[in-house]
Amino acid sequence: MIGENIKALRKTHNLTQPEFAKIVGISRNSLSRYENGISSVSTELIDRICKKFNVSYIDIVGEEKCSHQ
């Protein structure tokens, strides 16, 4: 689900995988693995994507972020 949402966000902005990966500071191969659900996406990367593309955490993961106390 997270990978699908990242891919949808990338396509909404008409970006290629290399372009999107460069914006968020990862390799194209990593992005491909995230989009295809092969690798897990870190909360740090999700936060970076949210900031760069002005979207909420919920838009990416589909649920609210848990705060660790």
Image (cartoon, grey):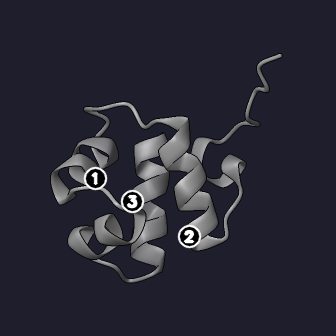
Work out whether 52 lies above or below 50: below
Q: Name the mark nearer the viewer: 3 or 1.
A: 1
Q: Quadrant of residue 50?
A: bottom right
Kindly identify which numbered label has been placed on residue 2: none
Residue depicted at x 70% and y 47%: 58
Residue depicted at x 30% and y 70%: 22
* Residue under numbered circle 3: 7
Q: Earlier in the sequence, mark 1 or mark 2?
A: 1
Q: Residues within 10 Å of mark 1 (few under 14, many from 20)?
A: many
Q: CA distance from mark 1 to mark 2?
A: 15 Å
* Residue under numbered circle 1: 31
Q: Earlier in the sequence, mark 3 or mark 1?
A: 3
Work out whether 60 lies above or below 40: below
Residue type for callout 3: Lys
Q: Residues within 10 Å of mark 3 (few under 14, many from 20)?
A: many
* Residue under numbered circle 2: 52
Q: Position of residue 12 (x, y in %)?
A: 47, 77
Q: Quadrant of residue 8?
A: bottom left
Q: Position of residue 23 (x, y in %)?
A: 39, 72
Front one among 48 and 9: 48
Front one among 4 and 60: 60
Q: Name the mark nearer the viewer: 1 or 2.
A: 2
Residue farthest along the left direction in this orientation: 29
